[in-house]
Amino acid sequence: MPFKPVILATVAAFGLAACGDTVAERAVIGGAVGAGAGAVTGGSVVGGAAIGAAGNVLACELESVNC
């Protein structure tokens, strides 16, 4: 497995585990982690932020993770 996907998966896992108290906090935390993952892997920072924000909010709202 190449190194970049491992980093991306690790960062995504930490991002989804890092919930906030409100929906806005969850979006900001997920967006920051997603943007960081995009920057580290050489991908789209904006796309990573959007996916991270949506993923974190959905994971917490759907109670997929313990927030």
Image (cartoon, grey):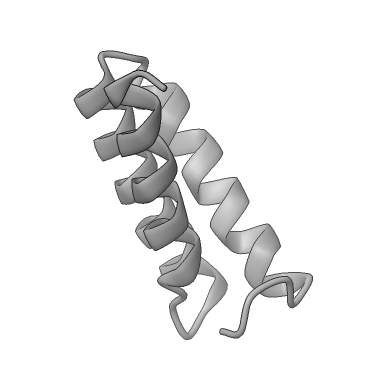
Identify the residue at horizontal 38%, vertical 61% (top origin). 14
Furthest residue in direction front, as rendered: 1
Q: In the image, is residue 61 above or below residue 32?
A: below
Q: In the image, is residue 51 above or below residue 3?
A: below
Q: Position of residue 36 (x, y in %)?
A: 25, 38
Q: In the image, is residue 21 above or below residue 4?
A: below
Identify the residue at horizontal 56%, vertical 84% (top origin). 67
Q: In the image, is residue 58 above or below residue 6?
A: below
Identify the residue at horizontal 50%, vertical 49% (top origin). 53
Furthest residue in direction right, as rendered: 62
Q: Count every numbered label the image shows and give the total.
A: 0
Residue 42: quarter of image? top left
Q: Position of residue 2 (x, y in %)?
A: 35, 18
Identify the residue at horizontal 42%, vertical 22% (top origin). 1
Q: Nearer the viewer, residue 3 or 36?
A: 3
Q: Position of residue 22 (x, y in %)?
A: 51, 80
Q: Position of residue 5 (x, y in %)?
A: 40, 27
Left or right of 63: which side holds 11? left
